[in-house]
Every structure is written in structure tokens, then in C-alpha cells.
Image: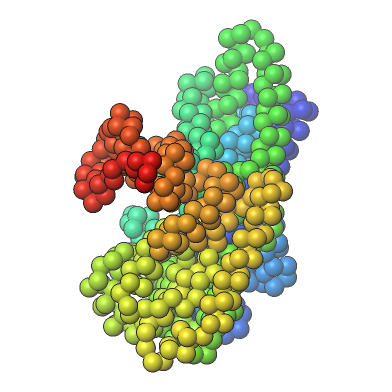
């Protein structure tokens, strides 16, 4: 697009653009809760204290002779230094700075075809898109490197581009597996230069030089193989991580529609823009849309790539509306609505409403999410000199344990390329009740303890199965963390030590008192991991009265948590309160209509309460969702006859 075709940006539109960046920043001001963060910190500390890492020093289950390829080693080292300077607050601020700078770098590219208001709306949509994953990770500096590469390639000659981009490419290569995007972007821009100008601004050897720069890494071509494998093999690239381990059981939040809206904007651009579309923004927009469809894992990069094209698309829609209506009064109203929506977004984020309703374990502000990892357990039991040398832990806790207890080796963590997907599948199967797999695991690694993060939905039933086997004893529980010790002579003293149990229970009761005080004070609370975990654990132990009391607090503080409503309803039914049980289960089905178990329990309680018509309707919906599961449930859980008043 030539300069004369660039849309005019009104002063108020520039203000809206500034406001949209403020919204993006607000979404990123959250307590850190992603489990990968701790492993990156642990690696950074090891690099700082012991030097280069050739093999995995953290886990006793990995092959020590195999070289560990860590594509984020430079990020890990930088993260640890930032942590030393200012802790979690410094890490969050550095993360936000990178994200904001990345989008600011692309403003000139978006400005070629869109005014400030269209750019602002695009940023707002992208902020909502990326909101769930705006956390510290190696992808964040890689995002900045991507934006800087695009910016330099847009305006610079070959010599200037190489002078700036070669060091950027080397740093990028040693921070994140997306580094192959650098040479690809170089090739795209060279192609555009070759087809649009007579004196080619960029030489053909530019992308070749960028590709050669990627060899400046400690692993050589092996790093490229790992990066390529993560692209062509979805399983190899799988991330065993979460922002909230219980987010899937919350009602879907309206922010999920941001991806659909962006796809619609991108599609409409091909219709609304009358002139020939520019090669680079269009290609990046289409590629970003492709990443949108593939997986939420790529939302950071997809948001960056679609930004210039989405802004152009929105400008095209605005121009079409102006021509169609003959005036632009609607634009003034639209800017007013946009302003109000930005303020509303800042309010829902700053008040913690967004994090509460979306099922996040983070809260608005700076710091670390409390009671999500085995913090207290590490102090009381896991650091004890008599604690077993080998303990099973979930991948979610592995990084934290490696960071908190550097003298002990862990079982596993979230580094999928290190362990392989079959390893995680085997662990899930063993904890899920497959006795043969579990016994083989115990014998192979001489396991003496099990550390379970209760926020994982499978932890409570797994703990119940192990306790019922008689071979494992509950040694510690603080709401979040469940620690089981194998019944051996070596563990007898720890199992019999009452102070260990009392310490965990005291911590849990303190957490619950604080939570209840906050409930009484009002406002939108943190989705408290400790109470969410405890409710599921007590329910699994069939301590229904205690679970009911606890879950009544959870559903007050986290009213869109469908699983809590489901368990709460079952507890009420077990305690004979069918009327309120029906209300709770109906709430669970409203929040998550796709949850077959909630419909089945609702059908059962309705039938027990004498409402056979409504029960049949609920059962019908369950059978429609999953007929085999519904049949198995009804066979294993026949409805009890309606109680008479005398009962």
C-alpha cells in the first residue's frame, strides 16, 4: 500500500490504541502458576552454579548417558538472573515488556493499511485471545525476536538486516524451538522484494545467512532435528502443562470467542479490501489463522502474525460500512463502545473476575500463586532426611520439586521431549488403577513414596486406591498435596509421627479460615487450589459430610466450577437432602452441558425424588452424550427407592 492510501488516525483513535495496549498489559499482570516456570528456574540455577549441563541432572528415571537437548537453555539462564534481581515481580514485568514491545514493533506494518482505531480493536481481540497463556515462558522472548525480525526485514537493506538480525537469530536459536521462523521470514521478505522492486532490496543469501546463524548453538544440527520433530509430530510437541489444572471443569468463558472473531475478521478482509492485498501481511495473517485452528498452544505467535492483517481487515470493514451508509457517524459510536469495552475489560481483570470465572489458578497482581504446589509439604516432610530417596510425583509438581529440593532427584516433570509421551501415558495408567503397570513401576525404580497434587482430578481416586490396598499409608495432607508412604520398616517412623500429619492439617485449616473470611468480605476470590483439592479428596474417601461442608465454600467462591457443583450435589444426596442435591446438579449441567456424569446423577436423584419424567429427560441427554458410559453407570448405580416420611 502506498502512503496516500494509509487511513487517517484521529487523536482519539491513538488514545484507543494506547488503551488497548493497557488491556493487554492488564491481562499479563497475574500471579505465576504455570509449572514449567519452576523447571526453567531450576535449570537456570544449575547453569549458574555448576556450568553447562550435558545430561539430565534432575530425574532418576531418565537415561544418564543420553545428551539432554535443552532448546531454552539461554532463557533459563536469563530467567534465573532476573529472579535474583527482583523475584516473581521482576519476571512478570520482563515478560510483559517483551510482549508489549513485540506488538509495538509491528505497529508500522499495521499502520500501512489501518488507522489507529482498527489497530486498537485488533489488539483488543488479540489480548482476549492470548489471555489464558500470558505467562512467563521461552515463547515470550521468541515472540519479541519474531517481531523484531519482521520489523527489520520490512524496512532494512540486506547489509543492515544482517548486522542486526544475525545476533538476534543466534539468541533466538538458543531460547526457543521456534527459531526456524527466522530464516523462513527472511525467505518470505526476499521473495516480496524480488517480485515488487527492480533493484532488489534484499539479497537471496539473506535467509541462507540466517539459517547458517542457527548453527551457533551447543547442540548443532540436533537442535534443528528436535525443532522439526516438534512440528511434524504433534505428540513430540505435546506440553504437559497448564495454567489451571482444574480449568477444564469450569463453564466456558466468553473470551473463548476471540479466536472465532479473529478468524471471521481475517476471512472478511479478503472481501472487504477492494485492492490487491500485500504479500507479507497477508501471508502472515493466513499463517496466523492456521496456527489459531491448530492449537491454543500457538496463541502467542498466531496473535502476533494476524495483528497487521486483522487491523487491515477491520479497516476494510469500516471503509465498506462508511461507503454503504454514506456517513461515518457509526464510527463515533463504535469508538465509544470500544472505549467502554476496554474499561470493562480492565475492570473484570483488575477485580479478579476474569481469573475467577475462567477457572484460572492465577490472580491479578504480582507474585506466585499460593497453595498450588507442594510448598508446605516440602518444608515438613519432603526435605526430611529419612524421606525415601525415590518418590513418584506428577509432572505438574516436578519442576517445583527440582527447584525447591535441589539435593533430591525427581520422578518426572513437564519436559515432554526428555521423557516421551509413552512415559506419561504409563504413569497415568498406573495411577488410574492398572495394577500390572503400577507394580512394574514400583519394582523398576524402587519407589518408597507417592506425592500427588490434589488439584489433578485423578489424584483423589488414585490415593484412595493406594490406601485401600493396605500397602501405602497417608503420611501427610494439607489440602493441596497428598503424600503416601510405602509401609516398610524404613518408613515406619515417618508414618507414625503425629506432628507431620498435624502440620499439614493445621496449614489446611488456616487456609480455609482465611478463605471463609474473604468470602464474608465479598469480591471475586482466587480459585483456591487447596480447597478444590481437599473437596475432591474427602469426596473420594466417602467422607461426604465433611466434603459437603467444604464444597459449599468452594461453590460460593468459584460459582462457575461445574465439578464442585456436581460433587456438592452428590454429597447432598448422600446426606439425604435431595431437594438441594437436585438444584446443585442442575447447576452443574447448566455450567457444563457436555458432562455426562452430571446428567446421570441428576437423573438418579430426580428418580429417587419421584420425578420420573424429569429423570427420564436427564437420562436421555446423558445417553445422547455417551451411551456406553451411561449404560455402565446405570448398571453399577441403580436408583434407590424413594424414602417415606418415616424413614
Q: Is residue 582 visible?
A: yes
Residue 350: percent from the left, percent from the top? 70, 45
Is 538 positioned to the left or the right of 559 in the image?
A: left
Residue at image coords 55%, 43%: 559
| Colour pattern of the rendering | rainbow
Residue at image coords 36%, 46%: 647
Residue 129, placed above or below residue 164 = above
Is 588 positioned to the left or the right of 131 in the image?
A: left
Residue 267: percent from the left, percent from the top? 46, 28
Residue 384 lies in quadrant: bottom right
Residue 382: percent from the left, percent from the top? 52, 81
Residue 233, placed above or below residue 617 = below
In the depicted view, which residue is nearer to us: 210 or 146?
A: 146
Quadrant that contains the N terminus: top right
Residue 73: percent from the left, percent from the top? 53, 71
In the depicted view, which residue is nearer to us: 341 or 458?
A: 458
Residue at image coords 40%, 78%: 473
Residue at image coords 64%, 66%: 510
Q: Is residue 43 visible?
A: no
In the depicted view, which residue is nearer to us: 78 or 35?
A: 35
Residue 588, placed above or below residue 220 = above
Amino acid at each position: 500500500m502506498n502512503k496516500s492510501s494509509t487511513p487517517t488516525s484521529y487523536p482519539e483513535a491513538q488514545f484507543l490504541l494506547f488503551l488497548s495496549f493497557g488491556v493487554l498489559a492488564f491481562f499479563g499482570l497475574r500471579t505465576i502458576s504455570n509449572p514449567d516456570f519452576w523447571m526453567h528456574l531450576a535449570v537456570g540455577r544449575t547453569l549458574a552454579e555448576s556450568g553447562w549441563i550435558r545430561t539430565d541432572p534432575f530425574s532418576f528415571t531418565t537415561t544418564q548417558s543420553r545428551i539432554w537437548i535443552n532448546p531454552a537453555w539461554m532463557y533459563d539462564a536469563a530467567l534465573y538472573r532476573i529472579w535474583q534481581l527482583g523475584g516473581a515481580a521482576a519476571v512478570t514485568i520482563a515478560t510483559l515488556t517483551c510482549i508489549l514491545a513485540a506488538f509495538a514493533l509491528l505497529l508500522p506494518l499495521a499502520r500501512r493499511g489501518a488507522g489507529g482505531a482498527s489497530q486498537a480493536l485488533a489488539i483488543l481481540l488479540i489480548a482476549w485471545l492470548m489471555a489464558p497463556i500470558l505467562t512467563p515462558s521461552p515463547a515470550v522472548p521468541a515472540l519479541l525476536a519474531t517481531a523484531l525480525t519482521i520489523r527489520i526485514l520490512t524496512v532494512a537493506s540486506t547489509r543492515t538486516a544482517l548486522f542486526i538480525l544475525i545476533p538476534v537469530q543466534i539468541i533466538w536459536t538458543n531460547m526457543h524451538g521456534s527459531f526456524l521462523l527466522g530464516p523462513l521470514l527472511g525467505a518470505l521478505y526476499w521473495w516480496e522484494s524480488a517480485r515488487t522492486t527492480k533493484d532488489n532490496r534484499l539479497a537471496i543469501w539473506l535467509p541462507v545467512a540466517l539459517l547458517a546463524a542457527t548453527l551457533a548453538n551447543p547442540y548443532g544440527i540436533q537442535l534443528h532435528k528436535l525443532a522439526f520433530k516438534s512440528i511434524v509430530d504433534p505428540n513430540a510437541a505435546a506440553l504437559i502443562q497448564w495454567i489451571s489444572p482444574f480449568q477444564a471443569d469450569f463453564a466456558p468463558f466468553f473470551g473463548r470467542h476471540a479466536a472465532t472473531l479473529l478468524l471471521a475478521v481475517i476471512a472478511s478482509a479478503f472481501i472487504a479490501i477492494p485492492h490487491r492485498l500485500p504479500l507479507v501481511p497477508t501471508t502472515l495473517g493466513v499463517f496466523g489463522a492456521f496456527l489459531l485452528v491448530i492449537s491454543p498452544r500457538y496463541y502467542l505467535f498466531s496473535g502476533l502474525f494476524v495483528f497487521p492483517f486483522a487491523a487491515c481487515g477491520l479497516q476494510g470493514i469500516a471503509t465498506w460500512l462508511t461507503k454503504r451508509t454514506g456517513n461515518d457517524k457509526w464510527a463515533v459510536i463504535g469508538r465509544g463502545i470500544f472505549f467502554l469495552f476496554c474499561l470493562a475489560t480492565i475492570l473484570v481483570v483488575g477485580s479478579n473476575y476474569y481469573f475467577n470465572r475462567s477457572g484460572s489458578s492465577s490472580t491479578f497482581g504480582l507474585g506466585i500463586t499460593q497453595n498450588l504446589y507442594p510448598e508446605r509439604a516440602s518444608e515438613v516432610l519432603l526435605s526430611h532426611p529419612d524421606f525415601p530417596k525415590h518418590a513418584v510425583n506428577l509432572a505438574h509438581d516436578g519442576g517445583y520439586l527440582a527447584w525447591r529440593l535441589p539435593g533430591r532427584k525427581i520422578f518426572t516433570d513437564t519436559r515432554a521431549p526428555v521423557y516421551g509421551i509413552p512415559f506419561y501415558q504409563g504413569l497415568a495408567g498406573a495411577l488410574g488403577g492398572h495394577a500390572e503397570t503400577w507394580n512394574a513401576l514400583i519394582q523398576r525404580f524402587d519407589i518408597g513414596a507417592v506425592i500427588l497434587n490434589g488439584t489433578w482430578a485423578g489424584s483423589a481416586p488414585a490415593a484412595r486406591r493406594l490406601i485401600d490396598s493396605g500397602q501405602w499409608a497417608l503420611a501427610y495432607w494439607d489440602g493441596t498435596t497428598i503424600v503416601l508412604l510405602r509401609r516398610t520398616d524404613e518408613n515406619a517412623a515417618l508414618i507414625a509421627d503425629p506432628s507431620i500429619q498435624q502440620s499439614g492439617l493445621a496449614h489446611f485449616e488456616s487456609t480455609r479460615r482465611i478463605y471463609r473470611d474473604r468470602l464474608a468480605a465479598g469480591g471475586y476470590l482466587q480459585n483456591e487450589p487447596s480447597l478444590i483439592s481437599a473437596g475432591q479428596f474427602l469426596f473420594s474417601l466417602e467422607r461426604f459430610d465433611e466434603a459437603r461442608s467444604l464444597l459449599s465454600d468452594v461453590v460460593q467462591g468459584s460459582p462457575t466450577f461445574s465439578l464442585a457443583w456436581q460433587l456438592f450435589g452428590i454429597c447432598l444426596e448422600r446426606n439425604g437432602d435431595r431437594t438441594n442435591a437436585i438444584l446443585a446438579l442442575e447447576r452443574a449441567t447448566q455450567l457444563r452441558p457436555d458432562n455426562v456424569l452430571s446428567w446421570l446423577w441428576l437423573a438418579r436423584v430426580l428418580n429417587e425424588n419421584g420425578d420420573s419424567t424429569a429423570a427420564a429427560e436427564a437420562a436421555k441427554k446423558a445417553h445422547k452424550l455417551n451411551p456406553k458410559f451411561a449404560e455402565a453407570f446405570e448398571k453399577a448405580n441403580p436408583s434407590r427407592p424413594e424414602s417415606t416420611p418415616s424413614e
